[in-house]
Every structure is written in structure tokens, then in C-alpha cells.
Image (cartoon, rainbow, N blue to C red):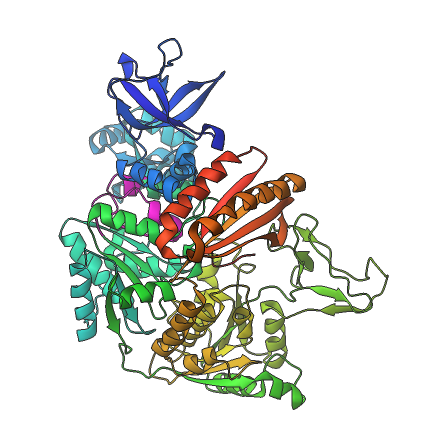
């Protein structure tokens, strides 16, 4: 028998299946096993992705599998099929797909955590106590201690009575030692958290369970009870002997969702996200693989969980950009979810108060099913949104980033001992430092990016590679000490609020404050317990939170996302504003929102102020259709990177010459083609060039295949080439 093996080498040149003979000692070898194989002059790891009877490889060149590396196949056959799909549709290497399916914690053989448990043999203990000498004072104490407990951890027992005493009692059989595997991740206890469903929620549950033929969009306003719908759907799946996969957009939201789900489902819940320790991820992955956990809750990468017999896949806040992987390997979570849902013939739920334009278009045209939940569970009205013209504020003499109205509303929060959330989608203290004399702005030495000033740590930091530098005191170009701060970030807002409200607890939630895996929960826990209090943050504060005492939400600078370099800028802005507004007034108190902007009459804000998603969608979909942007076209970005600038530039030139032939071949179906330096032209000392293509949906399959064939011709070990479909950012 012949094993088809993919070797674990991150190189496009060997990204194919190799044939190996299966020796008689490994006659039970199956698809999915991790194996050790000879490769050139080395012995390396590989993965069995197929088994067949014969090979075209000459006998004198056919090598044999050396051994298996685990006692079970680490890749489900479903995920092997997914890997081939990703290679053909997303231009990923086979090994990229495998590494997504088999995390490093499994590949690196992280060991199980073993706990030593001590129990008492009462018969031998009774005999021992009759003969024990008076000098052995600790031994009787240890025995009496164990009379009160059926089992005790060895480490704890040894700390109380000494290793020597405990070991001797084990040797003579008075104490019995057992070893058992324990999970490093501790989840919350199961409790009765069921809530009675509204008629809208009951209707949503029924529609979801019936929607196996096509994905279903759960379009519900913030506070409409989508999470309770998810849990009821999952509960019914479990009763049918099925499993469930629940995705949230960011790691920061996972602890909150895990708390809710573990209180309902207890030990049936497993967690997967990149912030887990190596041991925790190892334990959770094995719990899922072995079927001990029936529900997987996690961020984007959890879509590759080794879970069998899926009854439902749920993507919460489906519009969120974090579901698109914009670094290698590049993929769109929704596409992977659709593949797995088809494989298991199970419902795929896309939930959001502000669905992406592409998703809602599919729902409106019948490609997806649609179910709506247009009111909050508690019947509370949506918060009133007041738009503040910051140009007018400036004319009135207010040079602060906080308008008079926002400060007035914050004062009301403080006086009433309530809570407020302020959103600004820019971390750090200032987006840059600039010399007032010569306009010099410090940039990262390894990236083509301005350095962001972080006052708390007193450093300039690159938000692309993480490198840190000392802040400027004098300009290195002209020697001037007149240094200007750029646009403000979360740190500067916190400083202003602390000066304005010295007796109020101010909390900050962004990537700089969440430096450990428990920091997110700790900050939110402290905020929840403090009244009055103000939480300042980036996108982390915009979704998923339910604080009954939050009566006010302030958007410091709504325009940050509106003028972004993306065709999705208006859509992203509407989604962010709506999501963060939904954090206010979720209990008895009416919520209020202040949205600060320099373009108050922009249609995005006017529709947002009325929570009129449908009106926004109608405007945006008409614009997209007129200008031939998704969902009425496909945008493809080909990104070429190399430490050799000339190689990247020359390869881009060769590629654009070949791609220009598409204009003639496809005519009116080919809308746009341009090559350029990436807006961020260098990251981590790698030069970056890109080619942008836009063409009709009718020719997507043929164009992508031709692009991939051309890219195969220019492969080079010193050049990396990535393909992105409908990228959210071109930076």
C-alpha cells in the first residue's frame, strides 16, 4: 500500500503530495496520521492525506514511512478535503491548510498535565497506626487528615506533612497514589440560566433549525436577544446527539461568551483562540477531538476545530472584519464555514445587527434565508443619537476633542452614579510626533509607518512590527525642540478625563492595556463594579457588552473609519456607530449617544442616528451596483513581498504584463487593473507591491484559475505572493 504524504515544509516548491511505501509494521496506517518520513538527506514530519494501492514512482526511488508520531490520526478527513478546497480557491499551500487544522501545540508534542492524587487504604492505615513509633509524629497526622477527605493532591499533602513522610507511607501501602490528566483551562460552573423566549426568538430558533439548504442571516437589533437564540438552537442540537461551533469576532469577546455558555452547558463547552497558553490549547483541542466537548466557542481560527457531527455553525457579529485573515494564511471565515456546513448538512447562522452589505444582499436575493428581530427583548427604545458638529465647536472656541455636549452628558453620568463608554478607534496617546519647524515625522526603521506615541510607557511604537523607540525631545533633522502631537488616541482621552473627573474611575480597553489573557476580563470586571465610571476604548468596547448601568455612549471621532482607504469605509462606519450605540440603555434607564464628527450631514450618520439599516443598505447597494463594486464584482489583490526590493518590483512588472492580456480577453467584464507600491510599502524589512484587479462575478472562476497559474510560474523562495479576495483594506 502507498501513503500519499504532504511534508511539513513551508515552501511552495515542495507543496505537493509525495508517495511513500507503507511497511508491514504500519499496516494499520490511516489517512490523517502524522508520520516521520525520509526527505532528501533528512527525516521530517509529514501528514498522510491519502492511501492507494499503487504508485507511478519507480521502485528504486520509492522510500518508506519510518513511523507514526501519534497514536491517532490528527487530521479529520473532512479537514483534508477542506485543505484541498483552500488550495484551489484561495491560492494557499497545502501545508498552510494543515497547520490551520493541526495547531502548533499538537505538532510540538505538548504533554498532558498530570495530577498526583493520594487516597487512604483504611485497613493498612489501621495496622500501621498500631505499630507506629512516637518519633513518627507526621505520619499519624497525615492519616487522620485523609480520614476527612476521600482524596488529596500530592503536592498539597506533602506541603502539610513533608515529602519524606508521604513517600514512606506510599511505599508501605498506607497511602495509594493515582495519576490523572487534568485540564489546564478552568471554565465556569453550570447553573440554571435559562430565559423565557419571546415570540420573535422562538420564531428565529425554528427558522434556523429548518435552514439546512442555505445559510440563514439572523438580523436583530442590539439587545434583541440573539445570544439566547443561539443557545436554544445549540441545546436542541445537543438533544439530537449533534455538536455546535460558535464563533465570535475577537479574542477579547471570547471570555464573555464562554462565561455565558459555560453557565448554560458546563463541561460540554471547549474554548479555542490564540490567547490560550500552549498547554490550555493542547488540552482543549484534544477535548474537542475526543468528543468530550460538544460545543466549541472561539475566535476566527476555531472554524478549523476537529469537531465531528456538527449540528450548527454560528458566526456572531458576522459583519466584523476580524473574520477575514489579512496575514498568511489568508482566508475568509464565512467561506470555510459554508464548506463545513455543506459537509455536515447543518445550518450556518450569520448573526448581526448590521450585516455586511454582501451578506444582506444574498439574503435579499434569496441566496441566504433571512429572519429578523427588530425590537429589544426588554422593549426598551434604542438610545437617542445626537450628532455634534466639531467644526462648530472649534468656531465657538472649544479646541478640545470633547464637545460641550459630551462633557455635559458625562457630568450627568457622574452625578447619577451611572456608567459611560467612550469610543475612539485609535490607540496610543498620539498617532505621531512631528517637528513644527521642518515637518519631520519619525518612522519605523523596519516598516514604512509613522511611529505612534505611547505616553504611559514613554515610547514610540510601530503598530505593524511592534518595535519600540525613544520619544523625540529634539528633531534629529533640524535640532528644533518644537515637537507637535498628532491625532489623539485612547491614552490622551483618559488623561483628559482624569483631569476633568479626578474622583471618577476611568478605565482603558485597547490592545495596549490588554497585555495578558486575563486583563480583558479584569478590566471589564472592575468597570462593572465601579459606579460612577467611564470606559474608554477602541473597537473592543463596541460590541457584545451588556452593562445595565451604561446610560451614555460617546463617539469621540466618528470620522476615523469614514475616510479610510477602502470601498467599505461607509459600511464599516455605520456598523461601528450602530454597534457602540447599542451598548447604552440596555436596562431600565434610557440611553443617550453623542456622535462627534466634522461632516455632520454625511448620509452615513443621518441613517445611523435613526438606526435605519435598511435605508443605509439601499443607498449603499445602489452605489455599489453603479460603480461595480462587491457584491456586483470581485476585487482581487495580489500582494508581492520580498527583502529584495528589485525582485519584488521586477516580479510585479512581469505579472502586470501578463495580466494586461485579461483586458483584451474579457473586455467589458474586466473593470480595473493597476499595479502600485502598497500604501505601507515596507513591513518588517520586506518591500511590498500590489496589483489590484476588479472584474465581473460571471468570470470569477476562470480569472482566478488563470491568475493562480501565472503566479505558479513566478514562484521564488525569496519572493512571497499572496492573493486576497475582496480585501477590507489595501494598506
* Residue 134 visible to an observer of this rendering: no
Where, by quadrant of the figure, is residue 726 drawn?
Answer: bottom left
Whole-percent x and y of residue 309? 20, 45
Q: Residue at x 41, y 62 (%)?
A: 630
Whole-percent x and y of residue 208? 20, 62
The N terminus, quarter of image: top left
Of 682 and 523, nearer the camera is: 682
Q: Is residue 518 left or right of residue 132?
A: right
Whole-percent x and y of residue 210? 15, 60
**Which contiguous range is marked in magenta?**
286-311
Where, by quadrant of the figure, is residue 39 drawn?
Answer: top left
* Residue 447 visible to an observer of this rendering: yes
Of 652 and 551, nearer the camera is: 652
Vertical placement of residue 381 versus 493, above or below: below
Q: Residue furthest left?
A: 240
Decide whether residue 289 is among the magenta residues: yes
Q: Residue at x 34, y 76 (%)?
A: 614
Of 285 and 126, nearer the camera is: 285
Q: Residue furthest bottom?
A: 396
Vertical placement of residue 533 versus 270, above or below: below
Whole-percent x and y of residue 357? 37, 66
Q: Residue furthest right?
A: 479
Amino acid at each position: 500500500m502507498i501513503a500519499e504524504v504532504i511534508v511539513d515544509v513551508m515552501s511552495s516548491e515542495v507543496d505537493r503530495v509525495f508517495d511513500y511505501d507503507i511497511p508491514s509494521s504500519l499496516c494499520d496506517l490511516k489517512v490523517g496520521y502524522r508520520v516521520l518520513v525520509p526527505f532528501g538527506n533528512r527525516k521530517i514530519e509529514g501528514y498522510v492525506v491519502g492511501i492507494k494501492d499503487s504508485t507511478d514512482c519507480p521502485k528504486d526511488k520509492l522510500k518508506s514511512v519510518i513511523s507514526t508520531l501519534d497514536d491517532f490520526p490528527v487530521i479529520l478527513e473532512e479537514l483534508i478535503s477542506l485543505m484541498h478546497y483552500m488550495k484551489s480557491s484561495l491560492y494557499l499551500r497545502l501545508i498552510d491548510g494543515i497547520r490551520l487544522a493541526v495547531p502548533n501545540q499538537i505538532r510540538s508534542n505538548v504533554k498532558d498535565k498530570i495530577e498526583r492524587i493520594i487516597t487512604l487504604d483504611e485497613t493498612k492505615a489501621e495496622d500501621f497506626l498500631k505499630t507506629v513509633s512516637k518519633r513518627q509524629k507526621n505520619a499519624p497526622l497525615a492519616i487522620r487528615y485523609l480520614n476527612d477527605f476521600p482524596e488529596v493532591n500530592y503536592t498539597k499533602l506533602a506541603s502539610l506533612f513533608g515529602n519524606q513522610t508521604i513517600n514512606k507511607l506510599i511505599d508501605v501501602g498506607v497511602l495509594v497514589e493515582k495519576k490523572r490528566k487534568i485540564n489546564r483551562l478552568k471554565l465556569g460552573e453550570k447553573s440554571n440560566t435559562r430565559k423565557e423566549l419571546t415570540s420573535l426568538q422562538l420564531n428565529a430558533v425554528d427558522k434556523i433549525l429548518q435552514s439546512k439548504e442555505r445559510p440563514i442571516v439572523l438580523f436583530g437589533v442590539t439587545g434583541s436577544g440573539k445570544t439566547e437564540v443561539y443557545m436554544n438552537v445549540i441545546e436542541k442540537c445537543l438533544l439530537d446527539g449533534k455538536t455546535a461551533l460558535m464563533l465570535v469576532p475577537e479574542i477579547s469577546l471570547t471570555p464573555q461568551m464562554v462565561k455565558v455558555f459555560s453557565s448554560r452547558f458546563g463541561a460540554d463547552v471547549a474554548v479555542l483562540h490564540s490567547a490560550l497558553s500552549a498547554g490550555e490549547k493542547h488540552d482543549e483541542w484534544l477535548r474537542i477531538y475526543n468528543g468530550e466537548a460538544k460545543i466549541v466557542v472561539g475566535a476566527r481560527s476555531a472554524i478549523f476545530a476537529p469537531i465531528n457531527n456538527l449540528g450548527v455553525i454560528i458566526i456572531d457579529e458576522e459583519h466584523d472584519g476580524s473574520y477575514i485573515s489579512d496575514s498568511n494564511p489568508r482566508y475568509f471565515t464565512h467561506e470555510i464555514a459554508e464548506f463545513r456546513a455543506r459537509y455536515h448538512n447543518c445550518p450556518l447562522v450569520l448573526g448581526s445587527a448590521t450585516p455586511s452589505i454582501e451578506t444582506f444582499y444574498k439574503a435579499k436575493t434569496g441566496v441566504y434565508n433571512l429572519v429578523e428581530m427588530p425590537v429589544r427583548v426588554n422593549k426598551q427604545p434604542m438610545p437617542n443619537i445626537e450628532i455634534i458638529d466639531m467644526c462648530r465647536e472649534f468656531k465657538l472656541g472649544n479646541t478640545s476633542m470633547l464637545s460641550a455636549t459630551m462633557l455635559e452628558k458625562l457630568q450627568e453620568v457622574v452625578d447619577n452614579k451611572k456608567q459611560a463608554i467612550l469610543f475612539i478607534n485609535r490607540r496610543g496617546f498620539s498617532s505621531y510626533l512631528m517637528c513644527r519647524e521642518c515637518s519631520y515625522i519619525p518612522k519605523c526603521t523596519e516598516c514604512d509607518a509613522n511611529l505612534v506615541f505611547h505616553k504611559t510607557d514613554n515610547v514610540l511604537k510601530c503598530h505593524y512590527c511592534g518595535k519600540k523607540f525613544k520619544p523625540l525631545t529634539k528633531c534629529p533633522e533640524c535640532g528644533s525642540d518644537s515637537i507637535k502631537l498628532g491625532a489623539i488616541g485612547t491614552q490622551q482621552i483618559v488623561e483628559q478625563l482624569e483631569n476633568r473627573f479626578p474622583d471618577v474611575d476611568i478605565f482603558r480597553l485597547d490592545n495596549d492595556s490588554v497585555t495578558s489573557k486575563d486583563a480583558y476580563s479584569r478590566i471589564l470586571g472592575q468597570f462593572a463594579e465601579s459606579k460612577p465610571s467611564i470606559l474608554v476604548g477602541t473597537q473592543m468596547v463596541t460590541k457584545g457588552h451588556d452593562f445595565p448601568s451604561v446610560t451614555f455612549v460617546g463617539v469621540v471621532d466618528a470620522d476615523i473609519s469614514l475616510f479610510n482607504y477602502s470601498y467599505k469605509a461607509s459600511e464599516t462606519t455605520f456598523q461601528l456607530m450602530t454597534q457602540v450605540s447599542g451598548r447604552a440603555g440596555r436596562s431600565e434607564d434610557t440611553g443617550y449617544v453623542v456622535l462627534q464628527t466634522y461632516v455632520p450631514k454625511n448620509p452615513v450618520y443621518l441613517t445611523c442616528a435613526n438606526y435605519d439599516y435598511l435605508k443605509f443598505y439601499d443607498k449603499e447597494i445602489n452605489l455599489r451596483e453603479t460603480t461595480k463594486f462587491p457584491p456586483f464584482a470581485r476585487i482581487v489583490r495580489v500582494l508581492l513581498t520580498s527583502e529584495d526590493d528589485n525582485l519584488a518590483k521586477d516580479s510585479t512588472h512581469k505579472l502586470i504584463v501578463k495580466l494586461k492580456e485579461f483586458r483584451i480577453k474579457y473586455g467589458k467584464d474586466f473593470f480595473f487593473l493597476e499595479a502600485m507600491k502598497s500604501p505601507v510599502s515596507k513591513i518588517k524589512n520586506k518591500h511590498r507591491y500590489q496589483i489590484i484587479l476588479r472584474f465581473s462575478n460571471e468570470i470569477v472562476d476562470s480569472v482566478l484559475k488563470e491568475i493562480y497559474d501565472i503566479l505558479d510560474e513566478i514562484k521564488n523562495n525569496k519572493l512571497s505572493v499572496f492573493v486576497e479576495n475582496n480585501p477590507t483594506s489595501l494598506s
